[in-house]
Image (cartoon, grey):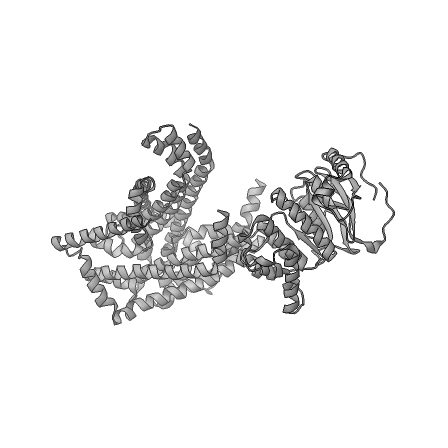
C-alpha cells in the first residue's frame, strides 16, 4: 500500500496542482475563453456522456476501432507467417512492403474517400490499412526470431510442417506478435479518431470537429480528454497483455523445443 | 597479529571502523578497519557477494559510509578525491564507446589544468605502460576484453592518482589474459609508484600480487585476518606461483574463506 | 542474394503492369493507369505548383520537427537525470503520449487560426512525445559505472550530463527522433487537410473533392517521395552521429 502511494502521489499531486492553477487562471480571466476551466470541461464530459450525445459517438469510435483492428491483426499475422516461413513469399513481397510501409497511411485518406465515400466502410478500410503495417513488421520479427536449433530439432524428429508451425514457430513468435498488437492497437485508435476528424460523419473525432466549428469549447475539450482516456486504457491493457506473453513465452518455447 | 606502529605520513589510506548499510537496510559491511602504506600492493579477498564492490565504492567516496570514516593522506574522504581512482570489473560498461581509446584515456584530463601537449604525453605514457600504443585510434569495442580493461587501467593511470582501487578487474577475462594483466599492474606500480588496493575472489591472484592480504568474511563483512606476503620481488608467474611459501599462504587463506572470526584483528 | 532482390522488384513491376493494363481496359475514372499518373506528376510538380504546395508543407514540417527535437531532447534528458522530476512527470508523460495527437488540431485551430503557426504548433505537439519519452529513457539508462567514473574524476553534475549522459543516450534519443519524424509527417498532412488553404495535405484532399483524380494520385506519390527523402536524410545523419554505436552493437551481437 505504501509503495503504491509513494509511486502515484508525486504525479497525481503535480496534475492536481496544475489543474488547480489552470482553474484559477481561467476563472480570473487571465486565460483566453478558448481555454476553459478544467471544472467546466469535467462538467461537460459528464453531461455529454450522460445525455447520450458523446456516449453514442464513443461507442461508434470503439466499435469501428475494434472491428478494423481485429481485421488488421488477422491479416497481418497470416501474411507475416507466410512471409516468415516461406522464403519465396518473403522475397517476392519484402520489397513491396519496404516501399509501402514508410508512406504515412493518412495520405491515403482522400483515396479511401474516393472509393468508399464518407461512411463506416471507408473508416474501417483506412484503419485496417494503417494498423496492418506495424502488425506485419512485428509479426515478421517474431517469426524470424525462432531459434534455428528448435527448427532443426523439429525437423530431426520428422515433425510435419503444420505441426512445426503450430508448436515451434507460433509460440516463439508470440512476443513479437504481442508487441505488434500493442503498437497496432494504439495506432488504430489514433487513425480512427483522425479519420473521423478529417472526413467522418460520426465518432469522437467527428464530435470534436463539430464542437470546434460550433464553438462549443468545453464539450470539445471534454471529447479530447475522453479520446485520451480511451487511448490510455487501450495502451495499458495491451501493454499488460504483452508483458504476460513475454513473461511466460520462454517457458512455452522450452516446452516446444523439448516436446 | 601486531605490527610496529606506522608513521602517519607513510599511510596513504586509512579505513577506520567502516560500516555500510544498503538502502534496503541490509548490513553489507559490519566493521572494517584497514590501512594501506604508500607504494604497497594490498589485496582484499572474499567470497562473491561479500560486499567487496560496496567497500571499494565507499572507500573511494562514491558512497557515504553509514558510520566510520575513510582518510586519504590524513584527509577525510567525503567525495571522490582526485588522488584515488576506481577501476571497475565491467570494463565494457565503464569505458565510453563513443570515444576512441586515446579519447577515453584522455577523458579524466579534461579536469586538470594542463597544456594540450602535457595531456598528450600523459596519455601516451599511459598507453605505452599498458602496451596499447598501436591501438590508440581504435574504439574500445574493437578490442578484446583484456585490452579493454587495459584501456580502463590506462585511463586511471593517466590521471596520475596516488592510489588505484581495483574491483575484481580481471574477473571477466580468461586465465591467460588475466596473467598478462596481473603483470601489467605490477609493472605500473613499479613504474609510476602507484599504491594498489585490489579486491578479488581469486586467492592465488591476491597472494601473487600483494604485499599484504586482508581476508573478508561474507556479509555482514568483517576482516577475518590480515596476512603478510613476504614473497620475493619481482614476482614472476611461474617462479612465484610454484614457490612453497606461496602455496602455504594460499592454502591458509582458502581455509579461512567463509569463516566468521572469534575476534577481528586489533587496529 | 541478388536473385531475391530481383524477385521483389519483379513483383512490383508485375503489379504495376497489371494496374496499367486493367486501368486502360477498365477505363474507371477513379483508377487511372500509372503512366497517366506519372505524366500528371511531371506536369504538376515540376512547376510553380511545387513551390505553392510542397514548399510550405516542407518548411512547416521541418520547423515543427526541429523545435520538437530541441525541446524534447533537452526536457527529456533533464527529466531523466533528476529522480524527482522523473517520478513526478514520467507517469504524466505516459498518459499524454496515449492521446491521439490529431485530436488537438481543432484546439490549435481555435487558439491559433489556420495559419502556419497553428500547423507548426500542432506538429510540435504531435512529434514531441516519443522524443521526450525516449530521451528520458536514454538518459536514465546510462550505466552506473560511467557515471561513477565521471564523478571519480571530479566532473560536476552538469559536466557529467553533457560529457557522459547525453552521448550515452544518443542511440535511444535517435530512436525517439525517428518516431517523432513520422508523427510530424502525419500531423502536417492532417492539419493541412483539416484546417488549411495550402500545402500538400490540403492539395490532395481538394483534388479528391474536385475529382482531379490523377492530380490526387500524383500528390500522394509526392508525399511518399517526400517521406522517403526525409527518412533517407535522417538515416544518413543517424549513421554519422551514431557510427560508434552501430559498430559496438554489431560486435556484441
Most foreground residue, A155 or B12: A155
Return the residue found at the far front.
Answer: B239
Seen from the viewer's position, the closer of residues C233 and C59 is C233
Is residue C107 visible in this depiction of the protein? no
Name the residue furthest bottom.
C48
Q: Is residue C52 above or below residue A58?
A: below
**Number of numbered callouts drawn:** 0
Front residue (pair C66, C231): C231
| Residue B16 in the figure: left or right of residue C117 | right
Q: Is residue C28 above or below residue B257?
A: below
Instruction: Residue A208: name its quadrant.
Output: bottom left
Give the image location of residue C85, x and y in percent.
Answer: 55, 54
* Residue drawn at point x = 24 percent, y = 51 percent: C10
Q: Position of residue B81 (x, y in %)?
A: 71, 57
Q: Visible in this render: residue C171? A: yes
The N terminus of chain A: image quadrant? top right
- Is A161 situated left or right of C17 in this image? right
Instruction: Give residue C62's position: percent from left, percent from top.
Output: 39, 65
Measuring 17% from the left and 57% from the top, which residue is drawn there?
C33
In this image, C237 relative to A105: left or right? right
The image quadrant where one finds the C terminus of chain A is top left
For the point 20% across and 64% down, which residue is it?
C40
* Outermost residue to the right: B4
For the residue pair B75 and A22, the one nearer the viewer reads as B75
Q: Quadrant of residue B175?
A: top right
Residue B140, how many percent across, how many down? 56, 54
Amino acid at each position: 500500500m505504501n509503495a503504491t502511494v509513494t509511486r502515484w502521489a508525486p504525479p497525481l499531486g503535480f496534475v492536481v496542482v496544475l489543474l488547480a492553477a489552470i482553474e484559477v487562471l481561467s476563472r480570473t480571466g487571465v486565460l483566453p475563453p478558448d481555454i476553459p476551466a478544467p471544472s467546466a470541461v469535467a462538467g461537460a464530459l459528464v453531461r455529454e456522456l450522460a445525455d447520450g450525445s458523446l456516449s453514442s459517438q464513443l461507442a461508434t469510435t470503439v466499435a469501428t476501432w475494434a472491428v478494423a483492428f481485429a481485421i488488421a491483426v488477422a491479416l497481418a499475422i497470416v501474411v507475416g507467417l507466410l512471409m516468415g516461413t516461406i522464403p519465396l513469399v518473403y522475397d517476392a513481397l519484402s520489397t513491396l512492403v519496404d516501399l509501402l510501409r514508410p508512406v504515412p497511411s493518412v495520405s491515403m485518406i482522400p483515396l479511401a474517400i474516393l472509393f468508399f465515400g464518407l461512411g463506416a466502410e471507408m473508416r474501417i478500410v483506412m484503419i485496417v490499412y494503417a494498423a496492418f503495417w506495424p502488425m506485419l513488421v512485428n509479426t515478421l520479427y517474431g517469426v524470424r526470431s525462432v531459434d534455428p536449433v528448435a527448427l532443426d530439432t523439429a525437423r530431426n524428429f520428422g515433425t510435419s510442417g503444420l505441426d512445426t508451425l503450430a508448436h515451434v514457430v507460433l509460440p516463439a513468435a508470440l512476443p513479437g506478435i504481442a508487441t505488434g498488437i500493442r503498437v497496432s492497437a494504439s495506432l488504430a485508435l489514433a487513425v480512427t479518431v483522425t479519420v473521423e476528424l478529417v472526413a467522418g460523419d460520426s465518432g469522437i473525432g467527428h464530435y470534436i470537429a463539430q464542437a470546434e466549428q460550433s464553438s462549443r469549447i468545453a464539450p470539445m475539450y471534454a471529447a479530447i480528454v475522453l479520446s485520451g482516456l480511451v487511448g490510455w486504457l487501450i495502451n495499458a491493457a495491451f501493454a499488460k497483455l504483452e508483458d504476460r506473453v513475454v513473461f511466460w513465452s520462454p517457458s512455452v518455447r522450452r516446452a516446444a523445443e523439448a516436446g | 597479529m601486531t605490527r610496529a606502529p606506522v608513521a602517519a605520513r607513510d599511510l596513504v589510506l586509512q579505513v577506520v571502523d567502516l560500516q555500510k548499510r544498503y538502502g534496503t537496510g541490509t548490513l553489507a559491511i559490519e566493521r572494517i578497519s584497514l590501512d594501506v602504506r604508500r607504494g604497497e600492493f594490498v589485496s582484499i579477498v572474499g567470497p562473491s557477494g561479500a560486499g567487496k564492490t560496496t567497500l571499494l565504492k565507499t572507500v573511494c567516496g562514491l558512497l557515504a559510509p553509514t558510520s566510520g570514516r575513510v582518510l586519504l593522506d590524513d584527509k577525510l574522504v567525503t567525495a571522490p578525491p582526485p588522488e584515488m581512482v576506481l577501476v571497475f570489473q565491467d570494463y565494457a560498461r565503464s569505458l565510453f564507446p563513443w570515444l576512441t581509446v586515446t579519447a577515453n584515456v584522455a577523458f579524466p584530463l579534461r579536469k586538470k589544468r594542463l597544456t594540450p601537449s602535457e595531456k598528450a604525453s600523459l596519455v601516451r605514457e599511459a598507453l605505452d605502460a599498458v602496451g596499447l600504443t598501436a591501438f590508440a585510434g581504435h574504439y574500445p569495442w574493437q578490442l578484446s576484453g583484456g585490452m579493454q580493461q587495459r584501456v580502463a587501467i590506462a585511463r586511471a593511470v593517466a590521471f596520475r592518482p596516488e592510489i588505484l582501487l581495483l574491483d575484481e578487474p580481471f574477473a571477466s577475462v580468461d586465465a591467460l589474459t588475466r596473467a598478462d594483466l596481473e603483470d601489467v599492474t605490477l609493472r605500473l606500480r613499479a613504474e609510476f609508484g602507484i599504491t594498489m588496493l585490489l579486491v578479488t575472489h581469486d586467492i592465488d591472484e591476491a597472494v601473487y600480487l600483494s604485499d599484504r592480504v586482508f581476508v573478508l568474511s561474507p556479509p555482514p563483512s568483517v576482516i577475518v585476518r590480515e596476512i603478510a606476503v613476504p614473497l620475493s620481488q619481482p614476482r614472476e608467474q611461474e617462479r612465484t606461483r610454484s614457490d612453497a611459501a606461496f602455496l602455504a599462504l594460499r592454502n591458509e587463506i582458502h581455509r579461512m574463506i567463509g569463516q566468521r572470526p572469534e575476534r577481528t584483528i586489533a587496529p | 542474394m541478388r536473385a531475391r532482390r530481383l524477385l521483389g522488384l519483379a513483383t512490383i513491376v508485375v503489379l504495376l503492369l497489371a494496374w496499367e493494363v486493367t486501368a486502360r481496359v477498365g477505363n474507371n475514372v477513379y483508377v487511372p493507369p500509372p503512366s497517366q499518373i506519372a505524366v500528371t506528376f511531371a506536369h504538376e510538380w515540376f512547376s510553380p505548383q511545387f513551390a505553392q504546395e510542397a514548399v510550405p508543407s516542407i518548411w512547416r514540417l521541418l520547423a515543427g520537427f526541429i523545435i520538437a527535437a530541441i525541446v524534447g531532447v533537452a526536457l527529456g534528458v533533464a527529466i531523466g537525470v533528476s529522480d524527482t522530476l522523473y517520478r513526478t512527470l514520467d507517469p504524466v508523460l505516459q498518459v499524454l503520449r496515449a492521446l491521439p495527437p490529431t485530436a488537438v488540431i481543432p484546439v490549435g485551430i481555435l487558439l491559433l487560426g489556420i495559419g502556419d503557426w497553428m500547423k507548426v504548433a500542432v506538429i510540435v505537439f504531435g512529434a514531441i512525445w516519443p522524443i521526450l519519452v525516449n530521451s528520458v529513457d536514454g538518459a536514465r539508462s546510462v550505466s552506473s559505472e560511467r557515471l561513477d567514473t565521471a564523478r571519480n574524476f571530479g566532473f560536476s553534475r552538469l559536466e557529467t550530463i553533457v560529457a557522459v549522459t547525453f552521448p550515452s543516450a544518443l542511440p535511444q534519443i535517435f530512436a525517439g527522433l525517428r518516431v517523432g519524424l513520422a508523427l510530424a509527417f502525419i500531423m502536417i498532412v492532417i492539419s493541412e487537410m483539416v484546417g488549411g488553404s495550402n500545402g500538400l495535405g490540403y492539395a490532395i484532399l481538394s483534388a479528391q473533392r474536385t475529382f482531379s483524380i490523377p492530380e490526387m494520385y500524383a500528390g500522394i506519390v509526392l508525399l511518399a517521395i517526400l517521406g522517403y527523402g526525409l527518412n533517407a536524410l535522417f538515416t544518413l545523419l543517424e549513421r554519422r552521429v551514431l557510427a560508434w554505436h552501430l559498430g559496438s552493437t554489431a560486435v556484441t551481437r
